[in-house]
Image (cartoon, grey):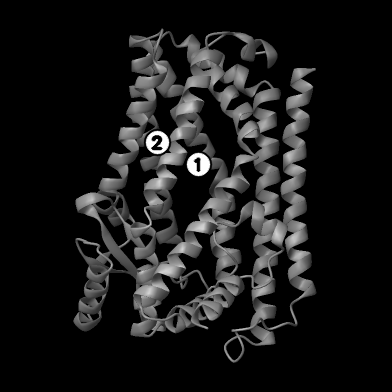
Amino acid sequence: MILFGIICLCLIFEALDQFLEFLNCKHMLRNRDKVPAGFEGQIDAWMIEKSCRYTVAKAKFSSVSELFDTGLALFFILGGILNAYNNLVLSMGISFVQSGALFFVGLTFAKNIVCLPFDYYGTFRIEKRNGFNTMTTALWLKDTLKKILLSTGLTWTIAALSLWIVRLLPDHWWLPVWAVLFLITLFALYLRPYLIEPLFNKFSPLEDEGLSDRIKELLSRAGLKVGSVLRMDASERTTHTNAYFSGIGGSRRIVLYDTLISRLTHEEILAVVAHEAGHWRGRHIIKMLALMQTIMLIATAAAFFTLKSDWLTRLFHIEQDSFPAKLVLLCFVGSLLLWPLSPLIHSLSRRFEREADDFACKLCGGGEALSSALVKLSKDNLSNLHPHPIYAFFNSSHPPATERVARIAAWRQ
């Protein structure tokens, strides 16, 4: 009965995700002849039609991908694959730490391989067909190989270290494991600009020294210090536009896509940077990190008490009780229990985006440049200008561009 309930819950959540995608596309197509307020003169009916085609294509692709992921997970767990894989790893007769690390590395590698066709289709069919992809097949293969090696190495390191603590402290491992995972997260955030990002993109100082000086002066007025302001060669892979802060502490820097630099005016770029600065001044990154780590702490404690028993392996008919197999099953069940948290986290993220917009308007002495930048970014990225409110509530980390532009207009008045 419990197993039946878990399967039903999984299918219900999958059906809800599919329905939300359908609802969003239906709402967008119903309003595709309407140019939103604030977008007049920049977005026409043809551009909205183009964004609709792009959104529908992504939605269909997302629906198929999610159905495949759900079906694969159920088949892996209920079809005897997890049981066979668990027996295979245990039959090797290696240590607890080695077998556990091998168990998770194998799953990570297999998942990466299975996802390759979807990644290729999304890149070379959907993105390329809509004018975004600029990657060659050779570059895609190179990036993919790096991602697989990186994810495999990280999985081995995290799994081996965590399992070593479990073996060392079997009666109270949950807090030390959480502490180690937290430290690894901070370490990764600090080293990301130095070790991870350069694997996939080239970074160079802004050629326009005047713009660089204005950005640094803007950040100084915001009370922020950054190590550098860099240009990223995003155009080697995509025509999408973006800007972001990277790193923490002394490694913090601001990164601008070269595509963004070429399409926005200096004032608009400054407004975008001011928005990113608003996230730091509002401590949004720290707050979100604290929230996620609190969830992780609770999850680790729950895992500690749950994994003491073999009820999960008995429930899912796993022949040999093992820590890695139980953890996989717990993650599957836990993902269902955490599903309702997703809209709450997205709601908090949207609140942070509004606060960052307000900060940018104040820092720049008005919202005209930010509003203009949002319109251009929406146009260049073929953003959905008419998302369904319910879909946005469940899935959007940012408020709709139309809402943001309207809020800025109200703020200016």
Nearer to the camera, 80 or 60: 60
Q: Residue at x 51, y 27 (%)?
A: 299
Residue 168 in view: yes
As drawn, the residue found furthest toward the bottom would be 41
Q: Residue at x 34, y 27 (%)?
A: 179
The alpha-carbon separation of the residues under discs 1 and 2 comes to 9 Å
Residue 211, by quadrant, is bottom left
Q: Is residue 219 above or below residue 47?
A: above
**Residue 200 on image: x %, y %:** 34, 57
Q: Which mark is residue 324?
A: none
Q: Which residue is mark 2?
A: 152
Q: Residue at x 69, y 30 (%)?
A: 74
| Crowd around label 2: few <14 · some 14–19 · many ≥20 (10 Å) | some
| Crowd around label 1: few <14 · some 14–19 · many ≥20 (10 Å) | some
Q: Residue at x 59, y 92 (%)?
A: 41
* Residue type, mark 2 in image: Thr
Q: In this image, 53 relative to 204: left or right?
A: right
Q: Which residue is mark 1?
A: 112
**Residue 295 on image: x %, y %:** 49, 33
